[in-house]
Image: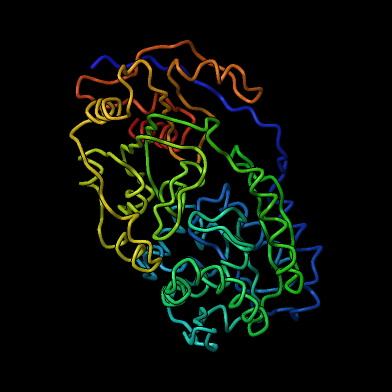
Amino acid sequence: MSFPPIARVRQVHDQPEVGDVPRAVADAIRSSRIGGRVKPGGSIALTVGSRGIAGIDRIARAAVDALKGLGLAPFVVAAMGSHGGGTAEGQRAMLAEFGVTEDALGCPIRSEMETTILGTNSFGLPIHFDRNAFGADGIVLLNRIKPHTSFTGRYESGLLKMLTIGLGKHQGAEQVHKLGLPGLRKLLPEVGAYLLEKTSVVLGVALLENAEERTARVVGVEPEELLEVEPKLLDEARTLMARLPFDQIDVLIVGELGKNYSGTGLDPNVIGRQRVETMPDLPRPVVTRLAVLDLSAETRGNATGIGLADLTTDRLVAAIDPKPMRVNCMTSNFLTRARVPLSLPTDRDVLAACLDTCWRVDPAEARMVIIPNTLELAQMWVTRPLADEAKASPWLRFETDFRPIPLDEGGALDQESLFPESVRGRRSTSLVGVGG
């Protein structure tokens, strides 16, 4: 098959950005009422999760230093539900991959999975809560607020989810997800409100990111205001998030899938596919044929979200570690996202199959987009049928002319040359430097 040529397009966003993020985090803590809630010397459990928050190592260190500056004794709690295989070692390893270590932060990290049962929810299920956090004199919820990858509601991914699911550890996450989407919508606010009363939450530090994956705002949220403030921050985050700029795409090629890009591996808010039982897909974009080529190194074999794709490569399938994916999907109760699609030997084979089955007679007519992952959307490569639409948009500009798709003799797509600014591109540069 003769592949259509592609050109690189950049999305241009006029969005807010915090200049000095560590200082903003420190200011949010110092200007809060935490000093009046916890006595000097009191222990503070600071939550850090498993999402790829921009600069989380510097943000966590700034929070630790600010808390120490107030005369408090912070420690970090791994607050990520069932991620990391649902084990203390796995969760500590995930934090280390983000640069969140005891040496880097200057405080202890507690990743033990033991919980305390604080009551039952309206469905009669136990409410689990991290034992280390429960024993602290105060809890500071540090998390990014953004649209959830599985449902829409007043509360999605944010401080309340960190409180109910992140600090619920494996068992708590399992209970909140037990009843699927109806349970999530009902239990997040219900259990969250209960835990705000029964635990020692003294502050929330909410992070909002813009479409360039940079911190757009840092907001200190007092616990008594959290239920009212978080939905407003979620609305703001929804306007900031990166999206694909086209409503209809014949072929979408995603370079890498991974938990470091989205909790679902491939963000449904970006690709328009939910693949959740009883739930319709999102209205945009409509993608006829979607393929993913690789797992990220950071996802450690967890291919959750592979079920959102139509086609993949044999090497991606070979790289899957079924244990963390099984734990993740069985905990969330969204099983269709773990279904492995048709796999083919090479990237060339996958591209050919996508173009052959995207309902276009001539591959040159295909509206094809290539992206590195569903988080980094500042740059993408498109085919000529999308050119007029891209040129008409005030938010898009062409950075190259149209050129052949870079495939080597073995049929592999040169993702590093297509996306040198991406996580994969930076990872490759780092490895080259290490190797000399």
Residue at 22% in and 28% down: 349
Q: Position of residue 428 (x, y in %)?
A: 38, 33
Look at the picture and state if 126 lies above or below 400.
Answer: below
- The residue at the point 38 percent across, 17 percent down is 365
Quadrant containing the N terminus in the rendered view: top left
| Residue 297 visible in the shown view | yes
Q: Nearer the viewer, residue 436 or 73?
A: 73
For this view, does 429 lie left or right of residue 344? right
Q: Left or right: where does residue 96 sit relative to residue 300?
A: right
Horizontally, residue 184 falls left or right of residue 293, namely: right
Q: Quadrant of the C terminus?
A: top left
User: Quadrant location of residue 325?
Assistant: bottom left
Note whether 146 is above or below 249 in the view shown: below
Q: Which x, y percent locates residue 150?
A: 48, 57
Q: Nearer the viewer, residue 282 or 290?
A: 282
Q: Nearer the viewer, residue 34 or 433?
A: 34
Q: Residue at x 42, y 19 (%)?
A: 383
Q: Give the colour scheme shown.
A: rainbow
Q: Residue 408 placed where, x, y %?
A: 25, 20
Q: Is residue 352 left or right of residue 179?
A: left
Q: Image quarter for residue 173? A: bottom left
- State the residue in front, 200 or 346: 346
